[in-house]
């Protein structure tokens, strides 16, 4: 299981373990207190203050600037495209990701290890390279005769590419932990293959599927790099939110850029909160 | 694995699923990725050699390397320290901090760039003018690019090290302490060997992420010719300037580095499982 890291950590029972270790922790000494202080200063300078600056900038121009930026037709079109495409891709990932995880865990055939490695390629590949990669097959001069560049299909393809591993990597460990005897029991009692899957396997997988879906959605709406070359960034047609934000910034309108960025931040945060709720429910059940 | 349900699974369903998965991955990932290699080596190694003869390319690759190494080192120190603090100590706000650490993973790269620009740019940033008066230019310069890279790769080391630290428990550390080892000795002799592999994965993953960062670095670096152009940004520029062969060659090098990182992690990981 190559790099399950970025995702598996999100679901791999970290919150369940956290509780146990909390009791064994000691209180801060002088050295560790100093360490915590330095770490917090760096974390604030790098992450907290800049993110706060985005929100402050967005609200700084008053509600009107915010409203203008958000109700701007082109921005709305970009938001709509980004959100709907991400939802579509996430739905596809929930189905395909589960099937891929199933095949990786339960099926055996030569070359499966390579398949496992291929899953991680979208994580490891630089996003701009991911765009170029897709362009070479689905762009002009495509060997399969599909010219998806500068269309909405390209946006869909790019987001599907970069979010591919999320559901697979969250479902896979759960499926590996699962014993097959319950399935055997259901099968021996006369349940069909499909009934067994629907009644026995699926309920166990649902939390993991949704956790992967939340991550995949958050990644989808924030995608930028893979779309730059592929989608053509045509206003009203293939321009996504992050490209729109960047064009505000390049045009010197930082307040509007911050407003759009705030929306992206809020949507991503909502996805993370949803993920946390799901995780806690799983931890309680386990 | 010899369970009857698995055995009895109709071979038709099995084959359909297998084909579906292989087909999906082939068309979405494997084929396009292999095409980049094909485009790169369309004229043998000439494409790569020409790309490497271009001073812009060499400069961009060097810059990418410097920025990535600096960011990985910072994240390594921060990550290991933060993991130890989160797992071994109690302090108010620990849970909130542990949740906040993961935020960078879900923030859009362009938003990361914007956030840093708003705080550190020399004209209207919160700290930028002061820093620039002190002689430190952050935005449109290397410090900003390193910060942007640090931001996007921040949680990767922590995510690897924290579960291992929790799994390990602190019995051995307490034993070492009670036998008279000081904090540094305990860390070096007991804790470090235990989390060694987790740190290695974390570093490799961070390196892959740092080498490939595009959006955040692009916003922070601005468009100052060759000065602050990292490899990924140059790929975009070369492609748009119709120097596609160079773009493909650079992409191949970046992809090669990324896949190499993946293989290193894949090879290292089972070692720890066996232990």
Image: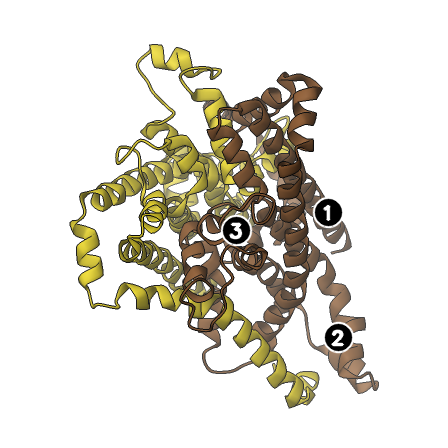
Observer-side mark, 1 or 2, equals 2
**Identity of the residue drawn at 40% across and 39% down:** B76
Spot occupied by residue A25 in the image (x, y as percentages of width and height) = 59, 35
Considering depth in this image, is A164 or B267 the residue closer to the camera?
Answer: A164
Q: In terms of depth relative to the viewer, which is nearer, B271 or B5? A: B5
Is any atom of residue A52 visible in this view?
A: yes
Residue A6: numbered disc: 3
Q: Which mark is residue B29?
A: none
Q: Which chain is yellow?
A: B
Mark 3–mark 2 distance (CA, rounded to whole Å): 28 Å
**Quarter-of-image position of residue B101:** top right
**Residue position marked by numbered label 1 in the rendering:** A280
Quadrant for the C terminus of chain B in the image? bottom left
**Image quadrant for the N terminus of chain B?**
bottom right
Q: Position of residue B253 (x, y in %)?
A: 29, 56
Label 3 residue SS: helix
Label 2 sits on a secondary structure element that is: helix
- The residue that disc 2 covers is A197
Query: With A226 as the anchor, is A16 left or right in this view?
Result: right
Chain identifier of the brown chain: A
Residue shown at 84% from the left, 85% from the top: A189
């Amino acid at each position: 299981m190559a790099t399950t890291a970025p995702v598996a950590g999100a679901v791999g029972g970290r919150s369940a373990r956290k509780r146990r270790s909390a009791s064994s922790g000691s209180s801060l000494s002088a050295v560790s207190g100093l360490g915590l202080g330095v770490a917090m200063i760096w974390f604030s300078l790098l992450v907290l203050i800049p993110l706060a600056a985005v929100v402050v900038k967005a609200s700084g121009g008053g509600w009107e600037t915010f409203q203008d930026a958000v109700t701007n037709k082109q921005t709305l079109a970009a938001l709509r495209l980004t959100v709907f495409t991400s939802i579509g891709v996430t739905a596809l990932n929930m189905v395909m990701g589960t099937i891929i995880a199933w095949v990786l865990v339960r099926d055996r055939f030569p070359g499966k290890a390579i398949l496992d490695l291929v899953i991680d390629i979208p994580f490891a590949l630089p996003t701009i390279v991911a765009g170029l990669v897709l362009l070479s097959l689905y762009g002009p001069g495509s060997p399969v005769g599909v010219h998806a560049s500068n269309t909405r299909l390209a946006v869909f393809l790019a987001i599907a590419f970069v979010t591919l591993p999320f559901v697979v990597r969250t479902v896979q460990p759960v499926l590996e932990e699962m014993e097959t005897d319950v399935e055997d029991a259901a099968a021996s009692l006369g349940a069909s293959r499909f009934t067994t899957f629907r009644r026995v396997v699926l309920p166990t997988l649902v939390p993991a599927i949704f956790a992967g879906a939340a991550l995949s959605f958050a990644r989808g709406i924030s995608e930028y790099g893979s779309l730059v070359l592929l989608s053509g960034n045509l206003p009203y047609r293939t321009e996504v939110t992050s490209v729109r934000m960047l064009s505000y910034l390049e045009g010197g309108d930082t307040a509007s850029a911050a407003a759009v960025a705030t929306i992206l931040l809020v949507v991503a945060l909502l996805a993370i909160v949803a993920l946390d709720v799901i995780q806690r429910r799983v931890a309680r059940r386990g | 694995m010899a369970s009857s349900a698995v055995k009895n699974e109709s071979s038709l369903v099995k084959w359909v699923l297998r084909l579906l998965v292989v087909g999906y991955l082939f068309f979405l990932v494997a084929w396009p990725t292999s095409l980049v290699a094909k485009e790169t080596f369309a004229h043998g190694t000439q494409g790569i050699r020409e790309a490497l003869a271009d001073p812009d390319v060499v400069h961009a690759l060097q810059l990418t390397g410097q920025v990535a190494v600096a960011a990985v080192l910072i994240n390594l120190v921060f990550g290991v320290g933060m993991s130890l603090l989160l797992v071994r100590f109690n302090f108010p706000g620990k849970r909130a901090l542990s949740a906040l650490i993961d935020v960078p993973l879900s923030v859009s790269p362009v938003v990361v760039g914007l956030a840093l620009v708003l705080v550190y740019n020399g004209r209207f940033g919160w700290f930028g003018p002061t820093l620039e008066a002190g002689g430190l230019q952050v935005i449109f310069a290397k410090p900003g690019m390193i910060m942007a890279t640090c931001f996007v790769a921040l949680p990767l080391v922590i995510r690897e090290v924290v579960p291992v630290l929790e799994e390990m428990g602190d019995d051995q550390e307490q034993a070492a302490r009670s036998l008279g080892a000081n904090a540094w000795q305990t860390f070096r002799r007991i804790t470090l060997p235990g989390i060694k592999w987790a740190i290695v994965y974390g570093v490799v993953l961070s390196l892959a992420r740092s080498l490939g960062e595009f959006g955040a670095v692009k916003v922070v670096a601005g468009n100052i010719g060759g000065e602050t152009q990292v490899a990924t940004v140059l790929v975009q520029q070369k492609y748009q300037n119709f120097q596609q062969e160079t773009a493909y060659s650079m992409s191949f090098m970046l992809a090669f580095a990324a896949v190499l990182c993946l293989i290193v992690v894949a090879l290292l990981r089972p070692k720890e499982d066996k232990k």
